Amino acid sequence: MSLLVQLALTFGLLSILAVGGGTSVLPEMQSLLAQQFDIAQTEFVRIYSIGQVAPGPNMLMVLIIGFKVAGLIGAGVVSLAFFLPSSILCFYAGRLWSHFAQNPWRRTVQNALEPISIGLMSSGVYAVAKASIVNPMTLVLALCTVYFILRTKINPVFVILGSGLAFYLFSRFLMPS
Amino acid sequence: MSTDNQTEGKASVSLHDLFLQFLIIGSVSFGGGIIAYERILLIDKRKWLSPDEFMGYLAISQTMPGLNSVNLAVLAGDHLRGFWGAVSASLGLILPGSLFVLLIGIAYTNNNDHPLANLFLTGIAAGACGLLAAITYRIGDQHWRHLKSVIIIAFTFGLMSIAKLSLPLVLLIMAPISIYLYRPNP
């Protein structure tokens, strides 16, 4: 039982600290997990990469950790602890935002935040690019994707699956090693 | 509790559809770039938010703790159908990946090497990167054309990605500067 409480407290704390997304608390998460639940770094990295390929928000990997520590119930506890606190905070921030809908300063604040927001997204693209653009072919695929998304009406899901297929075909048949 | 602009004309959004649409996003977003899918859903596909409303919620999602994509789902869901909308949207987003992650996590406890899958996934990751880049460009819209906003974008990017400062610190530095630059003229 105390294991579940530990899980809840650890991930609840990480939830509140994760300003700017899960990646900001990754180092903290890793050391907490090593300390409290004996999860080695290699294990952590492996779990992280599973989370990266999974659909949906990239921090769903924390469920695996919960499962490893305390089975399905652990996974459940972790999902509640990791997603609920920040979601509740955000919910009320949204309500506060609506409350000030008519206030002219809200317009100013939004105008000011917009370029910052775009800058943050650009940072995100850069971070993702560092991890995913590993050779010339991946760069070509990324650029092609940009083209297809911006200039055509093809469903993005198909574009991305196509990118996966293209790389597979390219690697298997055009670049034997 | 809900203000007028939250409830007018939005009652036509069913919780079921809200849940389903986010479930779809939660299921197909391999490789990442969820914010891109959310924008496409909210603005293009269902027209539930105007680009301006989206930007406001995006900014809140980024500044508040928690995953940006989940925060966005909470905010959009609340905007459309209040508390239960927020629950439906965020649950839909999280459910598919949760199942996936548990199944894969259980199945591949020790063995990680699947070269075929890795090739496919590498291509997908590259594609997702392109998607995110494309949508960021689209979100930027007019901001890319004005020196004032480009400078702020560049500085924010620089502080985050090059100086690698923490987000709270970056906001502490950039927000006052930006608010000053965008202050209403007396």
Image (cartoon, rainbow, N blue to C red):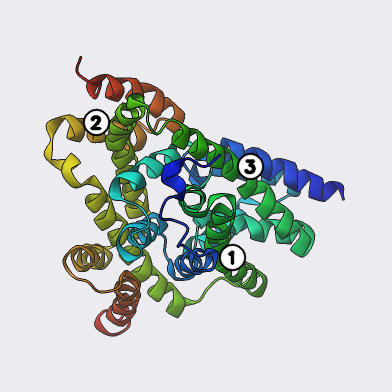
Protein chain holding label 3: A
Q: CA distance from mark 2 to mark 3?
A: 31 Å
Residue A42 percent location from the top left of the image: 59, 55
Amino acid type, label 2? Ile
Q: Provide the residue designation for mark 1.
A: B95
Q: Provide the residue designation for mark 2.
A: B152
Residue A85's label in the rendered image is 3
Protein chain holding label 2: B
Protein chain holding label 1: B
- Is residue B93 found left or right of A4 in the rendered image? left
Residue B27 percent location from the top left of the image: 49, 70
Q: In which quadrant will I find the N terminus of chain B?
A: top right
Amino acid type, label 1? Leu
Q: In which quadrant will I find the C terminus of chain B?
A: top left
Residue located 57% across and 36% down the image? A17
Residue A152 percent location from the top left of the image: 18, 70
Q: Residues within 10 Å of mark 1 (few under 14, many from 20)?
A: some
Q: Residues within 10 Å of mark 3 (few under 14, many from 20)?
A: some
